[in-house]
Image (spheres, coloured by chain):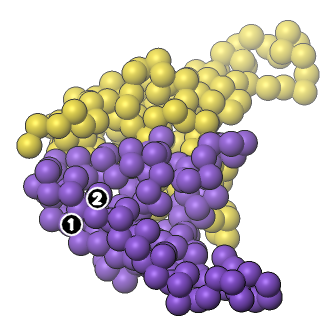
Chain colours: A purple, B yellow
Amino acid sequence: MYKHILIATDGSELAAKAVTAGLQLAATVGARVTALTATQPYAAMVGVDGPALVFPMDEYERSAAAAAARILEQVSKEAGDLGVECATVHVGDFPAEAITATAIAKNCDLIVMASHGRRGIGRLLLGSQAAKVVTLSPVPVLIVR
Amino acid sequence: MEQAMYKRILLPTDGTEFCERALRHGIDLAKIVQATVVGVTVTQPVHSALPLSLVPKTLLGTIQAEIVKMANEKLSAIERLAEAAGVPAELLRKSNDHPWEAIIDAAKEKACDLIVMASHGRKGIPGVLLGSQTQKVLAHSTIPVLVVR
């Protein structure tokens, strides 16, 4: 069945549920896992005028990388506990695009992600990134609630 | 590794090719995680521009019998695929104008913990990136949904 599962997380509580579900599935079917977290590009976060002066790009990159490392470390640890082989990637791109592109580039045969991310359930019935991935992805997508 | 993995997987189908790929996918998954599959197909109630009381009963009966027959054929296709894979299957026919609603209901009724469905169904129009019923199931489901392309 699945040989290589891509698990996407933004470190939120709901994403943690997807991580657990994805890792358990990987353990059951004997797949390896790539865990991915994306941080938005500097330009999208900061803008080009005011804030950029007080929040320099290298500092943004550093803190984004540190946040990503924390999120991914948690996944690696959980994977280790379940005996699942797990690689991690941090991509500095918009999440849905990063998830889909990585799944294709790494030949993943399943994407696992939460229905909503850090912006929570709010008024959307399906989170924007999940909706985009389901639409863009050529590989099957498991949306966890 | 024994996990509290999926135990009852709902497989909605409208009998199209798209759905068949999703069915096979769902049955393969069920085999590995040792789950039961629940096949469901949704028929649409008969509507008529004439008041239904004016439609001859025999005609209505014939139409309804034909609808049921077609639905049963779709369900027995699931049964055959599941049987070939050695996966236990339950079957369910529902009638609803909105397939997504019946799919959500079926998942509850049959206590399913996963829905595996195709990204498109019978209205699979090229250029539409995600089928309308799949979108609605994704929006309204409280259990995980695996979308197969």
Asked if A74 appears above or below B48 in the picture, the reply is: below
Residue visible at 42% across and 77% down in the picture = A65
Residue A62, percent across and down?
A: 46, 82
Q: Which residue is mark 2?
A: A75
Please, what secondary structure does the residue beneath circle 2 have? helix
Q: CA distance from mark 2 to mark 1?
A: 8 Å
A19 and B58: which is toward the camera: A19
Residue under label 1, please give it: A86
Q: Are marks 2 and 1 in contact (CB under 8 Å)?
A: yes
**Chain letter of disc 2 in the image:** A
Q: Is residue A30 above or below residue A89?
A: above
Asked whether, in this view, residue B9 is left or right of residue B68, the answer is left
Check the residue under mark 1 and report the chain it is in.
A
Q: Is residue B37 visible?
A: no
Q: Position of residue B68 (x, y in %)?
A: 54, 24
Circle 1 crowding by C-alpha within 10 Å: few under 14, some 14–19, many from 20: many
Residue depicted at x 71% and y 89%: A53
Q: Amino acid at mark 2?
A: Val
In the image, A4 versus B100, the foreground residue is A4
Image side of residue B3 versus residue B102, left or right: left
Q: Position of residue B44 (x, y in %)?
A: 67, 30
* Residue at 69% in and 80% down: A46
Question: Which tag, 2 or 1, sits closer to the chain's start?
Answer: 2
Please give the label number shown on residue B24. none
Residue sitting farthest toward the right: B50
Q: Nearer the viewer, mark 2 or mark 1?
A: 2
